[in-house]
Amino acid sequence: MNPSMEFAQKTALAYRAFCKPLCRELGLAQTAFDILMFLANNPAYKTARDIVEVRHIKANLVSVHVERLVQEGYLVRQAVETDRRKVELMSTDRAVPVIERGRALQTAFFDCLFSHTDEKMRQAFFATLQVIDKNLDAVLEEAR
């Protein structure tokens, strides 16, 4: 089997379809939901620039959705003490139930993806991903 871009695209489309009912119920755009979940699930990343660079969401979209999340009380901006020009994004108490429901949704999505597999298949899959990750690191290091 040859991996294809179609697999990654199909995964992203399925995830969006999975998220759609919750996003609709919460009145959040998918991108806003993705930003909120990214910040919650990756505490090392705290800035709009991090979202742009790591999630590859266009800067103007990040700006619009972060502003909406701030206005709706899900995020606050906090200046970094050592560099007042740098602003970190922090989730608020209002975001907690959304993040909890989002994490439950993400767990359900992965459970759905791994249905019809057994533990041995899942272990082999994740072991293979670790090898591929190391190979990607080597390719990127060589490119530098």
Image (cartoon, rainbow, N blue to C red):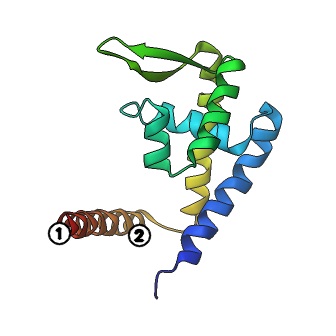
Q: Is residue 106 above or below residue 126?
A: above
Q: Is residue 2 left or right of residue 109?
A: left
Q: Is residue 103 visible?
A: no
The quarter in which the C terminus is drawn is bottom left
Q: Is residue 123 left or right of residue 106?
A: left
Q: Earlier in the sequence, mark 1 or mark 2?
A: 2
Q: Position of residue 9 (x, y in %)?
A: 60, 68
Q: Is residue 137 left or right of residue 112?
A: left
Q: Is residue 12 above or below residue 38?
A: below
- The residue furthest top is 81
Q: CA distance from mark 1 to mark 2?
A: 32 Å
Q: Is residue 38 above or below residue 55?
A: above
Residue at the image point whose x is 57% and y is 54% from the top: 111
The amino acid at mark 1 is Glu
Residue at the image point whose x is 67% and y is 62% from the top: 13
Q: Which of the two residues, 93 or 139, is positioned nearer the viewer here? A: 139
Q: Position of residue 1 (x, y in %)?
A: 46, 88
Residue at the image point whose x is 47% and y is 81% from the top: 3
Q: Position of residue 119 (x, y in %)?
A: 41, 62
> Residue 98's quadrant in the figure?
top right
- The residue furthest front is 85
- Label 1, on which residue? 142
The amino acid at mark 2 is Met
> Residue 131's quadrant in the figure?
bottom left
Q: Residues within 10 Å of mark 1 (few under 14, many from 20)?
A: few
Q: Which of the two residues, 77 or 94, is positioned nearer the viewer here? A: 77
- Label 2, on which residue? 121
Q: Is residue 99 visible?
A: yes
